[in-house]
Image (cartoon, rainbow, N blue to C red):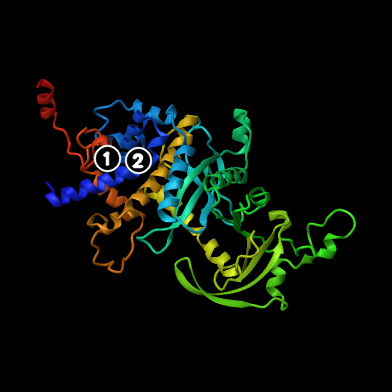
Amino acid sequence: MPHAPESEALQRSLATMLGTMEVVQPAFTQPGFRNAWVVFAGWVLTAGVHAVTQALVVTDVASRLHHERFHRFFSRGAWRPDTVGRLLFERVVARLCPQGRIVIALDDTLAPKKGPEVFGIGSHLDPVRSTKQFRMFCFGHVWVVVAVVVRVPFSPRRWALPVLLRLYRNKSECERRGHCYRKKTELGREMVNLIAQWAASREIDVVADSAYCNDTLTRDLHAHVTIFGAIRPDAVLTAAPTEAERKATGRRRKRGKLLPKPEKIYDSQRYPWHSAELTLYGRATTVYYKTLQAQWYRGAGHRLGRVVIVHCEQGAISMRAFFCTDGERSALDVLTTYAGRWSIEVLFRDIKQQLGFSDSSARKQAAVERVAPFIAFAYTLLVLWFADTIWMTPLAAPPIRPWYKHKRHACFADVLRAAQRVLLRVDVLDPARGYANLRHLARPLRQPAATALARAA
């Protein structure tokens, strides 16, 4: 049995976790939220292959409640992932970035799956295992993800917290089911528009790789949304039209004179090199770059943006070109903001390796479209909970490894381990330790015998 101080610390940590879960409670019915709490706790405690039934086993719910209740939570539950995502977005912004610009990362990830009756499954290019000479395809689901990039108090790097997901289906899958086909970039643009609505007047920076940096995402954006992305070395750049060109006869000009392409600017002596000391991807480095204001009409329309060409000292590629739709942003701002995109790649690794993002055996459309967002939202909830003073408690202490003494900061494995320490001794169905009582710890728990005596009197 744990000592009394330890029991009180565990109870406080559990109360903090339930308080974090309260953020998404308005998105569920009362029974639905209880089911969400059971599945969330079981998913966190699962060490091997993750599944709804395994979540019931590790929480000891399988012997007391029928498993169909929790399968119906995903297949027929009265909740929408976008509603949960909006509640999480508002909490993340209020808690971790209350001021300044909101940085959003946009990317997609492949979750390998098999089965002829699984909704949305298809053959997709696996970018991790593919090379320029050899392309590897894999059956599974492709999820387009939007995550808020934030700073957390327990780690020096930036973290990506997912708030919106969309399932991408290839053309053959859509034609087979008679559905309308939508590109990844169209799904991404839809989610960016949602974020712009939720953020009201806050300035938003959207960071995306070259696959999403095109006209589908960048054209006719909200005025307070700025896109950061990578562009091709042979992208066509133009200058802003001068007043004389604008007043010429005929249709009003939207583009000015043609500028050299990024690969030509890289070799040209007309554009000077600049250098700066920056911390990118967690390490201090000297960056050599060229920059100019230009229009990238094919990708961003007539907006005057900032182009940054960087010399790469390592790797097979000698230069990279980046573009920002706001021409007033500095070159260093463009580079540091774009470097934050790597946090979404770390997110994909964590939710696949430690939260079983690809493990679900859901087959029906509603279940498929809800299980993956539920797992991603669990990641966001865990990080929010850990950032709420839990990282300073003994629960966050990593295992003692004499051969690894230089660890100074927490990673998601530490977040997950701390949550497992809290939930390991909790009966998620015990009314004396359930959500309804722990949410009000200041009020003493009522004893069944005392209640019976009061009624008898």
- Neighbor class of circle 2 (other Cα within 10 Å; few <14, some 14-19, many 20+) is some
Residue where numbered disc 2 is placed: 22
Q: Residue at x 32, y 37 (%)?
A: 37
The x, y position of residue 296, in whole percent, is 71, 59
Please, what is the three-letter code of the amino acid marked with disc 2? Glu
Instruction: Name the mark on residue 439.
Output: 1
Q: Nearer the viewer, residue 354 or 14?
A: 14
Quarter of the C terminus within the rendering: top left
The x, y position of residue 360, in whole percent, is 41, 38
Q: Are marks 1 and 2 in contact (CB under 8 Å)?
A: yes
The answer to whether any part of residue 34 appears in the image is yes
Q: Is residue 260 left or right of residue 440?
A: right
Please, what is the three-letter code of the amino acid marked with disc 1? Arg
The answer to whether any part of residue 234 appears in the image is no
SS at mark 1 in the image: loop
The image quadrant that residue 315 belongs to is bottom right
